[in-house]
Amino acid sequence: MKQTFFFVTLIFQLLCLGSFQPPETPNLKSAVPFAKTISIEELKKTLFTFSSDSYEGRYTGEIGQKKAAKFLKEHHQKNGVLTPLGNNDYYQEIPSLFLPENTKASENVVAFVKGSIKPEEILVISAHYDHLGTQGAKIFNGADDNSSGTVALLEIAEAFQLAKEKGLGPKRSVLFLHLTAEEQGLYGSKWYVQNPLFPLKNHIANLNIDMIGRIDDIHIENSNYLYLIGADKLSSELHVLSEQTNKATLNLTLDYTYNRKNDPNRFFYRSDHYNFAKNNIPVIFYFNGVHEDYHLETDTPEKINYELLQKRVQLIFYTAWNIANRENRLVIDN
């Protein structure tokens, strides 16, 4: 009886092992040279420019935001990153009627690296580039919110483009989406998902970057951290891939405090990834938490921690690399 039980148990275990499919492990060796191009010097130079007074706080529809959009377009052009729209057009126009009352027409800025094997599958990496504008003599430059995410997106786009030029471009396409009108209520991403440049069903994931240049009060003693929100909401594979990538590369402390269902701050609903998640597209929201300069004119570029910003941007690049180059599309299982 004991011997029969042993053989039955053994057969059951073998069957379970045969059906078990472990998560795809990260393969990042070829990504390292391109991650290293994401430098402190470039991040700092671009962020100081983008959050300067000349952009007048980048309020949606106003002159400063238009200048910011032109800066983004020219930056991508300089680095050889193409537009998915053709004809050298990097702007996805948003009419004023779609935006809140008294808000002028605006535009998302889009750039694109086409995939080599599965070009129809689209990974979206996003960051909003608008901010709060001016109030009298006060200029809300938004260095952390969200110049930090904007320069991250520019650097990641350049790294993927360099990889493509070396014959190591991503298997899947990567859309770099600079979103407008986030501060007014996520209108840039709302417009995009209602008017996608590619079928929504082909969007495999969204990595959204919003405020990654500072340290909050909770992490003063351990600044080597980053909040992640939403990674496990739709795809457990995305969460596992994210964790594996971090352990294999930067090994930051990934803080899931704001990922809890009962989070009173409701950050999951407060940035542009939410409009992708609502459409059943797996997301990760990268965030450093709030600080004393949040939504104040004192959110200025000299307060950014550029060494930490570099690490965070490199982690997001590595994560995007793994998503874009894995064998199978992420499974939606939640």
Image (tube, rainbow, N blue to C red):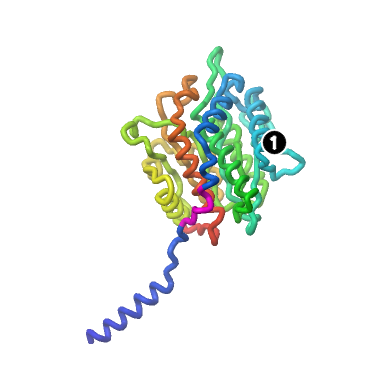
- Left/right of residue 11 with respect to residue 170 in the rendered view: left
Q: Give percent across and percent down for residue 132.
A: 55, 24
Quadrant in which the N terminus appears: bottom left
What residue would you read off at disc 1?
93
The quadrant where residue 289 appears = top left
Q: Give percent across and percent down for residue 156.
A: 56, 42
Question: Eyeballing the image, is 189 above or below 232?
Answer: above
- In the rendered structure, does residue 183 fall within the stretch colored magenta? no
Q: How many marks?
A: 1
Q: Residues within 10 Å of mark 1 (few under 14, many from 20)?
A: some
Residue 261 in view (yes/no): no
- In the rendered structure, does residue 31 fall within the stretch colored magenta? yes
Q: Nearer the viewer, residue 245 or 203?
A: 245
- Left/right of residue 60 with respect to residue 218 in the rendered view: right
Q: Residue at x 46, y 31 (%)?
A: 306
Residue 45 in view (yes/no): yes
Type of the residue with mark 1: Glu
Q: Nearer the viewer, residue 210 or 196?
A: 210
The quadrant where residue 3 appears = bottom left
- Left/right of residue 260 with respect to residue 31 in the rendered view: left
Question: Eyeballing the image, is 8 above or below 286?
Answer: below
Q: Nearer the viewer, residue 99 or 239?
A: 239
Q: Give percent across and percent down for residue 252.
A: 39, 43
Name the element at disc 1: strand
Q: Which residues are magenta?
A: 26-32
The quadrant where residue 85 appears = top right
Q: Give percent across and percent down for residue 203.
A: 59, 52
Q: Residue at x 53, y 47 (%)?
A: 33
